[in-house]
Image (cartoon, coloured by chain):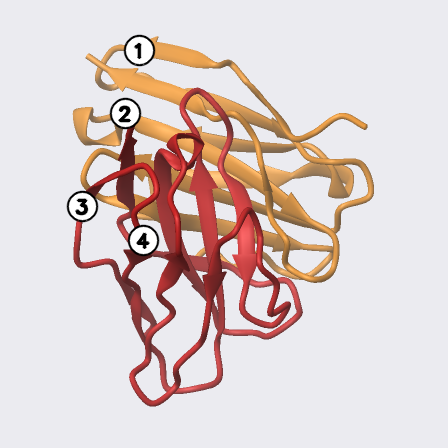
């Protein structure tokens, strides 16, 4: 079946603008994760949704970052007032119940 | 707090040579450890996890709780093993949980 999909694949924006990144997880997967992959920093956890539980937001770097997961499926990561240090590849992953996380192709965000 | 350390950024070996990618972790509980791999122009994917005790593509990794290590090993490297490898830790075993990743290591296998 289809894997995790993300859109857009690339996003170039100007400093100060807001951006929305979308993730479509594998159908039926109960957990959805957002990570950020920066050069030299590896992968950093951002936020995690599990079923109907309150999300784990402990990795969000500032209050400019937020995420929603509607209907237990699609998720949107929003970055407000983007800064140049937000430039990175944003990865989404989903898993069913044993924490084997399936990753999407990522969205490459460039903030000019 | 949990932390994963991959002390090297790059390992370059010749085809047929043994490979050991180092991973050390810091966590007070009983974590689950993973190795993820990202081949060129492909998605990040799970290679193996310590609770499965499997050998995948000739790679093995043993969790050493005394040394808090989870090194990835392969006796004879192949060119197709060239990729970025990430060690990751979950605070929960066998259940969904966020992953803490190391910074990754690039493995280059030369012909």
Do callouts 4 and 1 point to residues on the same chain? no
Q: Residue A109: which disc?
A: none
Q: Calculate the distance from the C-alpha at mark 2 to the C-alpha at mark 3.
A: 29 Å
Q: In the rendered view, does A2 fall on the left or right side of A82?
A: right
Look at the numbered discs 4 and 1 and tell me whether their residues touch, using CB distance below 8 Å: no
Look at the numbered discs 4 and 2 and tell me whether their residues touch, using CB distance below 8 Å: no
The residue lying toward the viewer, choosing from B106 and A21, is B106
Q: Quick one: label 4 or label 3, which is nearer the N terminus?
A: 3
Look at the numbered discs 3 and 1 and tell me whether their residues touch, using CB distance below 8 Å: no
What residue is disc 3 on? B9
What residue is disc 1 on? A13
| SS class, disc 2 | loop
Q: Residue B18: which disc?
A: 4
| SS class, disc 4 | loop
Look at the numbered discs 1 and 2 and tell me whether their residues touch, using CB distance below 8 Å: yes
Q: Is A12 situated above or below B95? A: above
| SS class, disc 1 | strand
Provide the letter of the chain coloured red.
B
Q: Quadrant of the N terminus of chain B?
A: bottom left
Q: Chain of mark 3?
A: B
Mark nearest the camera among 4 and 1 is 4
* Percent position of residue A8, x then y: 51, 14
Q: Chain of mark 2?
A: A
Mark nearest the camera among 4 and 3 is 4
Do callouts 3 and 1 point to residues on the same chain? no
| SS class, disc 3 | loop
What residue is disc 2 on? A82
């Amino acid at each position: 079946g289809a894997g995790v999909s993300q859109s857009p694949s690339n996003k170039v924006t100007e400093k100060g603008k807001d951006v929305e990144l979308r993730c479509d997880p594998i159908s039926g997967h109960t957990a959805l994760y957002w990570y950020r992959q920066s050069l030299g920093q590896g992968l950093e956890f951002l936020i995690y949704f599990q079923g109907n539980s309150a999300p784990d937001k402990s990795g969000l770097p500032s209050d400019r970052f937020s995420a929603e997961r509607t209907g237990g499926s699609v998720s949107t990561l929003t970055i407000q007032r983007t800064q140049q240090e937000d430039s990175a590849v944003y990865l989404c992953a989903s898993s069913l119940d044993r924490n084997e996380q399936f990753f999407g192709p990522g969205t490459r965000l460039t903030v000019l | 707090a949990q932390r994963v350390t991959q002390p090297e950024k790059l390992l370059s070996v010749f085809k047929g040579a043994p490979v050991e990618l180092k991973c050390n972790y810091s966590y007070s509980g009983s974590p689950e450890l993973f190795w993820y791999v990202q081949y060129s122009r492909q998605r990040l994917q799970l290679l193996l996890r310590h609770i499965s005790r499997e050998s995948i593509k000739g790679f093995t990794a043993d969790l050493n709780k005394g040394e808090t290590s989870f090194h990835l090993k392969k006796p004879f490297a192949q060119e197709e093993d060239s990729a970025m490898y990430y060690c990751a830790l979950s605070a929960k075993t066998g259940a969904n949980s966020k992953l803490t990743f190391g910074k990754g290591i690039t493995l280059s296998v030369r012909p």
